[in-house]
Image (cartoon, rainbow, N blue to C red):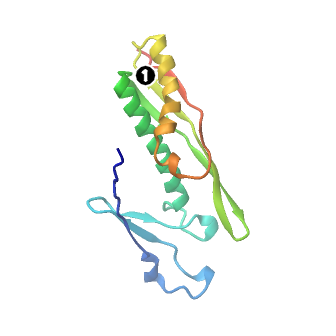
Amino acid sequence: MTREHPYKATLRWSGANAGPTRSYAGYSREYVVEIAGKAPLRGSADPFFRGDGSLHNPEDLLLAALSGCHMLSYLALCGREGIPVVSYTDDSSATLVEEQGSGRVTGALLRPVVLIDAACDDAQLARALDLHDAARAQCFIANSVDFPVEHEPAVSRAVP
């Protein structure tokens, strides 16, 4: 069964308040993304592209979406299998390569560090590690991009 889940967002170039695009160097890259019922998200270009480094850029948001999707897929799988996750962090990275005036993300690496309940047995520990592969297969963001999304997970028991 196929189901569709629509999403809507409105992006507004807030940098227009600083003036029009008279030259490449002379305009603000700041924008606001608004999604009904949620706080506005301020963004800009990466500082390399003359943006404001204190704001999120599209590349940051793409990486955050990949990391968040993997985590949510993983936690759902653990929950369904009764594996109690008590902590999850991910120090992820991605690479953007510029080519002939454009660019593309060539890969992302997720490094989730997971703690499961101290009472878990060895089989649960091994399964918790294996579920990262299933989470990768289920993550709809990773399934939507045309570059590899690798993961190097670490799973251990929490200290009692």
Image position, residue 72 (x, y; %): 40, 39
Residue plotted at (56% across, 43% down): 92
Residue plotted at (49% across, 55% down): 61
Residue plotted at (47% across, 40% down): 70
99 over 158 or under it: above or below: below
Q: In which quarter of the image is the N terminus?
A: top left
- Picture quadrant where residue 41 is located: bottom left
Image position, residue 133 (x, y; %): 53, 31
Residue plotted at (48% across, 72% down): 30
Pick the residue in front: 104 or 84.
Answer: 104
Q: In this view, does 94 lie to the left or right of 155?
A: right
135 over 108 or under it: above or below: above
Q: Residues within 10 Å of mark 1 (few under 14, many from 20)?
A: many
| Residue at which label 1 appears | 116
- Picture quadrant where residue 10 is located: bottom left
Q: Quadrant of the C terminus?
A: top left
Secondary structure state at the residue bearing disc 1: strand
